[in-house]
Amino acid sequence: MQKLQLFTIITIGCITSAMLNLSACKTNPDTIPKDLTPQEMVQLAQNATDKNNYKRAEVYYTEMLNRFRFNNEAVCSASYEIAFIHYKQKKWDVSRSELEDLLERYTKNDAALLPAKYKILAEIVLGKIDDRQNKSKPKEKKSKETKLRKFK
């Protein structure tokens, strides 16, 4: 009887511990402290990215976009980082679209107010996406007619 009680207590303890660990890992905008600066949010997002927790990082960056929508540096940084997360996840089309949206900002009247580094980074990553997508496309087979033209 005592073994059964001990087993039950240990089982309940393990389940409770697992539930607490899982709930502690969740991050949503409600659990992000309201007084964080954009730099602090970037650091938390980078920490999550370093642990390959892209979902959590994206939550931080999205919240940055919501909280600091009038801060050009924060918006460009968060927009780029979200697109880069999608690039790392091999979501080429999503990343391309987000990077193109970011680059579109640099064609507007207030482009001079935007940090240039995110434009440069976005262009570099778009080039890498192009390279990867071109490598994955099958090469066209030359027809007999095309081969014959070379010999004429």
Image (cartoon, rainbow, N blue to C red):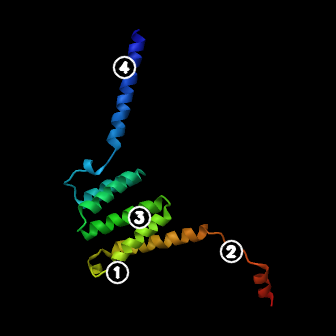
Query: What type is the residue that disc 2 sits on?
Result: Glu
Outermost residue toward the top? 1
- For the point 34% across and 80% down, the residue is 107
**Element type at mark 2:** loop
- For the point 36% across and 51% down, the residue is 56
Tell which circle, 1 or 3, labels the residue nearer the N-terminal end.
3
Give the CA distance from mark 1 to mark 3.
19 Å
Task: Decide if residue 132 is in sight here.
Answer: yes
Q: Position of residue 25 (x, y in %)?
A: 35, 43
Q: Check disc 1 and report the residue beneath it.
A: 107
**Element type at mark 4:** helix
Q: Check disc 4 and report the residue beneath it.
A: 9
Vertically, is 43 above or below 77?
above
- Label at residue 115: none
Tell which circle, 2 or 3, labels the residue nearer the N-terminal end.
3
Vertically, is 14 above or below 107?
above
Give the CA distance from mark 4 to mark 2.
66 Å
Q: Position of residue 54 (x, y in %)?
A: 41, 54
Query: What type is the residue that disc 3 sits on?
Result: Ala
Quarter the C terminus occupies: bottom right
Q: Position of residue 43 (x, y in %)?
A: 30, 56
Q: Is residue 90 left or right of residue 40?
A: right
Give the CA distance from mark 2 to mark 3.
31 Å
Q: Check disc 2 and report the residue beneath it.
A: 140
**Element type at mark 1:** loop
- Are dots 2 and 3 in contact, CB under 8 Å? no
Q: Position of residue 92 (x, y in %)?
A: 49, 65
- Are dots 1 and 2 in contact, CB under 8 Å? no
Q: Check disc 3 and report the residue beneath it.
A: 83
Task: Decide if residue 46 is in sight here.
Answer: no
Front residue (pair 101, 85): 101
Tell which circle, 3 or 4, labels the residue nearer the N-terminal end.
4
